[in-house]
Amino acid sequence: MKKLALAAAIGLISASAFAAQGDIIARFRVINVNPSASWSNSGAVSGLTVDAKDDTVPELDFTYMITNNIGTELILGTSRHEITGNAGTGDKSLGKVSALPPTLTLQYHFTPDSTVFRPYVGAGINYTRFYNAGLNAANLGINADLQVKKNSFGPALQIGADFPISKSFFINVDVKKIWMKTDVSVASNGTYVGTLKVDPLVVGLGIGTKF
């Protein structure tokens, strides 16, 4: 009887071992994208500061386990942010812009076979595509539509953990810091206005499984 119980326990542990070489892990998260915005001003608008508001959106990601401990993750999601400007008269809305930042990280999983807690860290690169921009500087006293540079590359850092809830599923908590920026110019003549750095902190909670 003791041998049978031991065999059953070993089988349960083995069945719940999630991250192994060759596995593909999929996660669905709800994330809050909270920019830490800063503005490099060309002097076109004296004393201008710019900010970007946060957004909460879904995110999908896939991790391929190269070894039992090392994986590479592709993160997919898009968010839309209201941009505000302040030239000394309070925050004024400049409109909204969407960001699509597919991010690739290389991860290290510390305890991939744990039945309780599977932490990981990651680092990588993001390519951000800015799109659907509707920005205008009228609220700053400048009657001009603004355009943004569409492409941006930057680093990304990540820390997170999976918490198994069954043989097939786990709860995931994930935090990422992503660096992204875009040049802003006057749409009609291309005059450079400044550079907006978005640099969001992305906090996510979700569920995952493996294939």
Image (cartoon, helix red, strand yellow):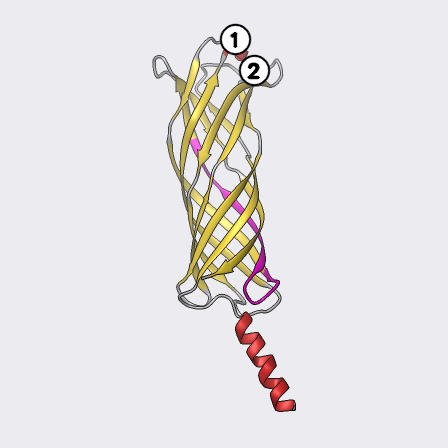
| SS for dot 2 | loop
In the image, which is nearer the foreground, mark 1 or mark 2? 1
Where is residue 60 shown, x and y percent of the image?
48, 47
Q: How many marks overall?
A: 2
Disc ID at residue 141: 1
What secondary structure is the stretch in magenta mostly built from? strand
Within 10 angstroms of label 1, few (less than 14), some, or many (20 or more) residues? few
Where is residue 151 shown, x and y percent of the image?
37, 33
Q: Is residue 85 left or right of residue 189?
A: right
Residue in the foreground of this view, choosing between 152 and 164: 164
Does the residue at mark 1 contact the one at mark 2 (Cβ under 8 Å)?
yes
Q: Is residue 126 above or below residue 193?
A: below
Range of magenta residues: 163-181
Q: Residue at the location (60% across, 15% down)?
A: 88
Residue behind mark 2: 87
Question: The N terminus is located in which quarter?
Answer: bottom right
Q: Is residue 159 above or below residue 45?
A: below
Q: Is residue 144 above or below residue 113?
A: above
Outermost residue, right direction?
1
Kind of residue indicated by mark 2? Ala
| SS for dot 1 | loop
Within 10 angstroms of label 2, few (less than 14), some, or many (20 or more) residues? some
